[in-house]
Amino acid sequence: SRPRPLPAPPMTRRTPAALLPLLAAAPLAAAPPAADFARDVAPILERACVRCHHPGDARGDVALTPADLRDGGYVVPGKPAESGLLALVEPGPGGQRPRMPKDGKPLTPDEVAVLRRWVEAGAGWPAGVE
């Protein structure tokens, strides 16, 4: 005669039903909040960029204005992979120092992530802010 198959361990048989209340109560991983220009983005740009890239003294012919950033391809709203700004402030291969800022402390990974979220969300820039 054939051997009878072994029954599944008790926990396996009850797992789906037993886990439903736990799964329903478990918080889902929340997406990071959208980057707010005034609260999140402007302080990063002021600390790391404005000193050298402002209207009237735009080193490298790049000023931190919406027109310069967009026209130069530094910020492509909704497309972080195409935005040159992110390539400039991210560490290079093997953790090399980013190309920007040339002077001062490089952006932290959190600051780069803020800029990435800002670009992903459309790179909104409040009217009247230059």
Image (cartoon, helix red, strand yellow):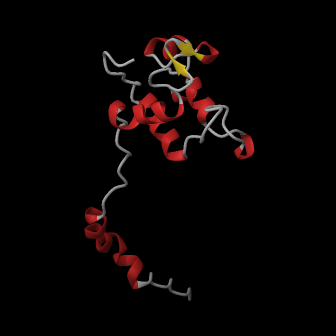
* The one of 119 and 104 positioned closer to us in this rendering: 104
* Left or right of residue 127, residue 69 in this image: right
* Left or right of residue 67, residue 52 in this image: right
* The one of 62 and 112 positioned closer to us in this rendering: 62
Q: Residue at x 36, y 23 (%)?
A: 124
* Left or right of residue 35, residue 100 in this image: right
How many labels, in total? Answer: 0
**Where's the N terminus, which quadrant?**
bottom right
x, y percentage for residue 17? Answer: 29, 71
Above or below 122: residue 62: above
* The one of 1 and 19 positioned closer to us in this rendering: 19
Q: Residue at x 53, y 28 (%)?
A: 49
**Where's the C terminus, which quadrant?**
top left
x, y percentage for residue 98? Answer: 66, 36
In which quarter of the view is residue 107 placed? top right
Q: Residue at x 33, y 56 (%)?
A: 28
Above or below 77: residue 97: below
x, y percentage for residue 33? Answer: 34, 42
x, y percentage for residue 88? Answer: 62, 30
Q: Residue at x 65, y 40 (%)?
A: 91
Above or below 22: residue 2: below
